[in-house]
Amino acid sequence: MSRHVTPNPWENLRQFTAARIALGRCGVSMPTKEHLTFQMSHAMARDAVHLPLDMEKLKNDLTDILGIPPEQEPMILHSSASDRREYLVRPDLGRKLADESRNRLKESAINTESTDVALIIGDGLSARAMEANTIPFLKEFLPLLDRAGKTIAPLSLVRHCRVACGDDVAYHRHAKMAVILIGERPGLSSPDSMGIYLTWNPLPGRTTDAERNCISNVRPEGLSYTAAASKLAYLISKAFSRQLTGVDLKDDQEELAEPAARPDLLG
């Protein structure tokens, strides 16, 4: 540390947290290095909110890397928000599908049977989170669904998406449960955090946050992909057993060191 900076006695605790603690001081001000670091983190958080998610690239990567067959090709959809600015100032528009996307879903679902789970991928408030975390997480989670024999609707990718938009998609996919992966609001130390929300019996415009369960901070520096997949598998199993999600569905799962060794997770 510079001889001009007065150290903070808590400095050794910084190794245990990404929080901005023990920054020291230069006179009565923040040290220049820490001020510049803050500005960089703030810029990264802003970029995460404003930069668009390349849906076509993500769709192609999902298809190629996960080996999705042509008949299950992911569908790119839009919320009712026309652009990023409208999405940010009108949250209500991000909670429902645009009419054109809803009609496409209805047409694709004609003569199709109901499915257990509809998986939705939304850009949310961090494109960076979805670019970094979607495919690694699905590599961990999809085998659990497959092993349990749960049927899954074709993946849906939704631009300018809020959490409730997943209910709209799942309803028109004839799914018993909506599971949406979405970019979380970035923090100054976590611009790439992905959230997962699950809703039993999703209905457009009806489901409240009290009727969902959330798994938050999915990323390498937060909740690992393996742990998040295990937690989601457990909650889905409980949801199908009790036919509900939300405040009445508690995550009382025991800690599992290796969820792949538990083929009954979704049984």
Image (tube, rainbow, N blue to C red):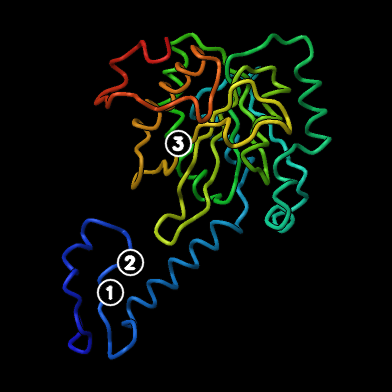
Crowd rating for badge 1 (residues with CA inside 10 Å; few <14, some 14–19, many 20+): some
Q: Report if the CB atoms under discs 1 and 2 are less than 8 Å apart.
A: yes
- Which one is in front, 197 or 69? 197
Q: Residue type at mark 3?
A: Ile
Residue 233, percent across and down?
43, 22
Tell me the element at label 3. strand
Q: Which residue is mark 2?
A: 20
**1 relative to 167 in the view: left or right:** left
The quarter of the picture where the N terminus appears is bottom left
Residue 113, percent across and down?
69, 8
> At x 60% / y 48%, what residue is drawn?
53
Q: Which residue is mark 1?
A: 23
Q: Residue type at mark 1?
A: Leu
> At x 78% / y 50%, what residue is drawn?
82
Crowd rating for badge 2 (residues with CA inside 10 Å; few <14, some 14–19, many 20+): few
Residue 42, percent across and down?
47, 67
Q: Residue type at mark 2?
A: Arg
Q: Which residue is mark 3?
A: 215
Direction front: furthest residue:
248
Give residue 10's quadrant in the image.
bottom left
Which numbered disc flags the more N-terminal residue, 1 or 3? 1
